[in-house]
Amino acid sequence: MRPALSYPENVVPSLRFQFCPMCTAQLVREVIFDDNIPRVKCPQCGWIQLSSNAVAVVVVAHSPEGMAAILPPGEAGAGLPAGLVEYGEDPAEAAVREVLEETGLEARIVDCLGWIFVNRASWPGPMIQIMYEAEIVGGQLKGSDEGAARIFPWGELPAISPTRTGSQKAMQAYLEKASGGTGKP
Ligand SMILES: [Zn+2]
């Protein structure tokens, strides 16, 4: 039995394989390609671990009345509707789905506000978060297990939770766009 494979700290627990998911042989780490990057591989069947960054979305969803936000329990501030993109799902569709799931509101994407890279060690690991602007076109406000949902009138937006990097960056990107670069909506 070889000693257990160790993993860099930004590898989430669910990707810290010790045994091959295809044939159950004990995995090894070695340089395979001419990129000189040591990779986890199976010496028996040739399986190679090539993990991807997680892909997530965060949405600034607004109507003439204001902006949709959630109030996550136990957090010092609000969050924007956000979540992971499912395997095979278009990120724009994921954005519409997350707004509906977390606020009960129907939204239509009007713009992409860019993306950020968050290199986090906790779940879901390193993540690319795509920021969208959407228009609220229907539905009825309804919270979820992520917290109560509200439409906050412009000028009464609560502070964004300090742990929600994506929500903070999306708000910032939206306000810069809305102000034409002056920082004011
Ligand atoms: Zn194998």
Image (cartoon, rainbow, N blue to C red):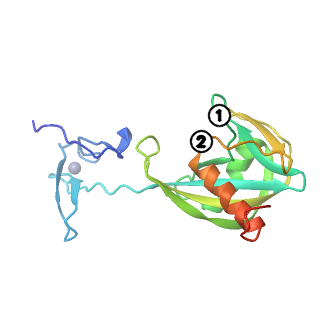
* Residue 46 screen position, x and y as percent: 20, 57
Identify which residue, 112 or 102, lies in the foreground.
112
Q: Amino acid at mark 2?
A: Pro
Considering every residue shown, the one lying at the far left of the view is 1
**Which residue in the structure is indicated by mark 1?**
76
Q: Which residue lies at the image location 84% right of the left edge and 49% below the top edge?
A: 155
Q: CA distance from mark 2 to mark 1?
A: 7 Å
Q: Which residue lies at the image location 63% right of the left edge and 32% below the top edge?
A: 75
Badge number at residue 162: 2
Which of the two labelled residues, at mark 2 and mark 1, occupies the earlier sequence position? 1
Q: Which residue lies at the image location 56% right of the left edge and 41% below the top edge?
A: 163
* Residue 152 screen position, x and y as percent: 83, 45
Asked if 110 appears above or below 80 in the picture, the reply is: below
Q: Amino acid at mark 1?
A: Ala
In this view of the protein, can residue 162 be seen by the observer?
yes
Considering every residue shown, the one lying at the far front of the view is 182
Determine the secondary structure under disc 2. Answer: loop
Considering every residue shown, the one lying at the far top of the view is 74
Q: Which residue lies at the image location 72% right of the left edge and 40% below the top edge?
A: 70
Q: Tell me whether the residue at label 2 lies in contact with that at label 1, contact meaning CB atoms closer than 8 angstroms.
A: yes
